[in-house]
Image (spheres, rainbow, N blue to C red):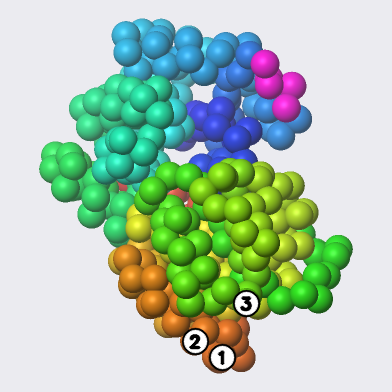
Amino acid sequence: MTIGFDVSQALYGTGVSDYTIEMAKRLKVTLFGYSLRRQTELKKLFPNAKIFPFPPTAMHYLWNKFHLLPVENLIGTIDIYHSSDWAQALSKAKKVTTVHDLAPFLYPSETSSQIVSVHTARMRWVVAECDKIICVSQSTANDLVKLFPSTKNRTIVIPEALPSRFLLEPNTHNPEPYILAIGSRQPRKNITRLVSAFLNYRPAEKLIIIGENSSIINHKSIIFTGYVSDQDLVNYLASASCFVYPSLYEGFGLPILGTFHHQIPVAVSDIPVFHETASNAAVYFDPYDEKSIASGISDAINNKTKLVKLGTEQLKKFSWQKAADETIKVYKSLC
């Protein structure tokens, strides 16, 4: 059984990148990818992969729009083709893909028109041609079936696990207490409401937000770091008094697992996907209620010992090797 696995999206520092890197380490597959400007980086990540000097935009048009050039023309005959989250190639092989979230369809106004266009075009072929569709959470699987009912009997849930970049050891310690969040200016990330909750209910505390720089607030207690390195992310995480995740929608919630690893209490939105990821190892709050957000943070800090213990146990439920083994079962079911 020969499997072609597209690693093109490993370069972007996202949850999809984490998934691509971790699965590629564990699956005995033919790795391939494409990039024009960053092909050297891709080759460094995957020395044994077949890397092609093609720009992603060109592959989007070639594969998603016009559905030309069989992937076999690039990598030879394969039995299974496991596509990336970006492009769905033409192929004679059985087809598997992974869906990480449905934000471009559920929140199109918050997503760039280019990304919406790419995912809409790709999903047309996923729905029409993929034999199996792996979803990283039951919540994502439920969303997929609601949006594309014909996928119901082809969908399987295989959870993600803790990305290796969260395993770095912190090399600095900040003794000044602060609450940590990760987010962006997308409204579904709910950062504006989080900031308001702090200013109204926790004005004496410091809130550090990792992600896009933002001009939504100028206050000495609210710090936007912009994007940071993996090492700095771990440094911030390991020294936090609490991690807060106020999102209205996520596909899985990988930072929660990073929080468990570094033994930091976590307060999260009361949405279905976070119950899958965190179970009873987090404090849940109403993400639409500022007072509830503030109260959830207090409860998490006050119950740190209990939550850290529960988080350590919850983390054991997620394994990249288990994810790889379950993915191999999907491959075998098609041959």
Tell which of 132 and 106 is nearer to you. 106
Report which residue position mark 3 lands on. 204
Q: Say which element carries label 2.
A: helix
Spatial separation of the CA atoms under disc 2 and disc 3: 17 Å
Amino acid found under the numbered disc labelled 1: Asn
Pointer 1: residues within 10 angstroms few (<14), some, or many (20+)?
few
Q: Which mark is residue 90?
A: none
Tell which of 224 and 124 is nearer to you. 224
Residue 38: x %, y % from top left: 68, 21
User: As drawn, is 271 to the left or to the right of 243?
Assistant: left
Pointer 3: residues within 10 angstroms few (<14), some, or many (20+)?
few
Amino acid found under the numbered disc labelled 3: Ala
Report which residue position mark 1 lands on. 302
Characterize the magenta stretch by its predominant secondary structure.
Answer: helix
Q: Say which element carries label 3.
A: loop
Of labels 2 and 3, the one closer to you: 3
Kindly give the residue lying farthest to the left in the view shown: 149
Image point 40% across, 22% down: which residue?
114
Asked whether residue 39 is drawn in magenta, I would say: yes
Q: Are marks 1 and 3 in contact (CB under 8 Å)?
A: no
Q: Quadrant of residue 171?
A: bottom right
Amino acid found under the numbered disc labelled 2: Asp
Asked whether residue 50 is drawn in magenta, I would say: no
Residue 294: x %, y % from top left: 46, 77
Residue 19: x %, y % from top left: 54, 46
Pointer 2: residues within 10 angstroms few (<14), some, or many (20+)?
some
Residue 50: x %, y % from top left: 63, 21
Q: Are marks 2 and 1 in contact (CB under 8 Å)?
A: yes
Spatial separation of the CA atoms under disc 2 and disc 1: 5 Å
Indicate which disc, 1 or 3, sits on the residue closer to the N terminus.
3
- Segment colored magenta: 37-41
